[in-house]
Amino acid sequence: MKFKELFEDKWTDAFSILTASKGLKDDEGIEILLKLLKATDDESGPTLSAPAWSRGGGDPKVGQSHVSREAVQQNLAGNPSTKAVDQKQQLCLQQQQEQKKQKHQEHDGHDEMGKSIVRKIIRNLKFQKALLNHKEITILVVQCLRLCCLMQAQYPPMVLDFSFRCGDVFHTDALDAFSTRGPTMAYLVWPPLRLHKDGPLVCKGYAEGLKK
């Protein structure tokens, strides 16, 4: 999942849960999700390795290459027959089922790890447990972990820029307005992504502006 899509999809889902279902004000929900992202970013470096999170499921090329090898073996063994074609179709079906099972297993593992990290973050940040006890919150954390691990795998590591503060000039080169535009910032909503620390911008973030 791309950085901007993570904000537009999973972050928005989690934000809706906090404001519509949990009854928080917009700025309260945004503050919690920003702290959650920052804590997840801090957690990703020492806790997780990128390869386990970058796979995101079985590699479809494995199954494809295996089918190709089987097809070649059948052709080398003799002229293809109806029986051989049926066997190939059956093999493809079995491989699809195995890949689907593997994806479910990895998703369950990632979901469990996400829940574990959520619990740790809640303890560390002293959030109310019931506040973040929702599937959409866990999904957001899992996706953020995957993103942050991939960022850490780069050299030098890519970084999320949390340096923007209330009252700062609204830097339109790095930030888009969340709902209100203005010359100064009210608060950061979603941080920009940079190629490395103090490096060039990769993707803009979002902030709420102040009109005066």
Image (spheres, grey):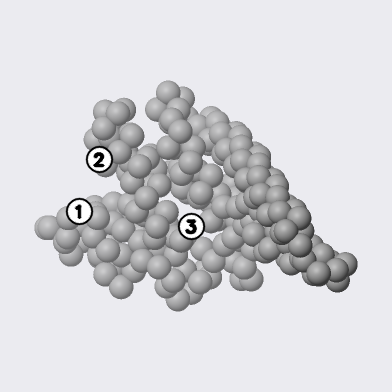
Closer mark to the observer between disc 3 and disc 2: 3
Report how far apart the C-alphas of labels 3 and 2 lie in the structure: 25 Å
Instruction: Pick whichever of labels 3 and 2 is earlier in the sequence.
Output: 3
* Callout 2 secondary element: helix
Amino acid bearing label 3: Met
Q: Quadrant of residue 114?
A: top right
Residues marked 1 and 2 touching at CB (< 8 Å): yes
Instruction: Pick whichever of labels 1 and 2 is earlier in the sequence.
Output: 2
Query: Which residue is under mark 2?
Result: 26
Amino acid bearing label 2: Asp
Q: Residues within 10 Å of mark 2 (few under 14, many from 20)?
A: few
Report how far apart the C-alphas of labels 1 and 3 lie in the structure: 24 Å
Residue lying at 46% horizontally and 33% vertically, measured from the top left: 135
Closer mark to the observer between disc 1 and disc 3: 3
Position of residue 188 in the picture relative to residue 76 (left or right): left
Amino acid bearing label 1: Ser
Query: Which residue is under mark 3?
Result: 1
Residue lying at 53% horizontally and 35% vertically, measured from the top left: 118
Q: Is residue 195 above or below residue 47?
A: below
Q: Front-most of 15 and 201?
A: 15
Q: Quadrant of residue 86?
A: bottom right
Report how far apart the C-alphas of labels 1 and 2 lie in the structure: 11 Å
Query: Which residue is under mark 1?
Result: 179
Which quadrant of the figure contains the C terminus?
bottom left
The image shows residue 120 at horizontal and vertical percentages of 57, 33
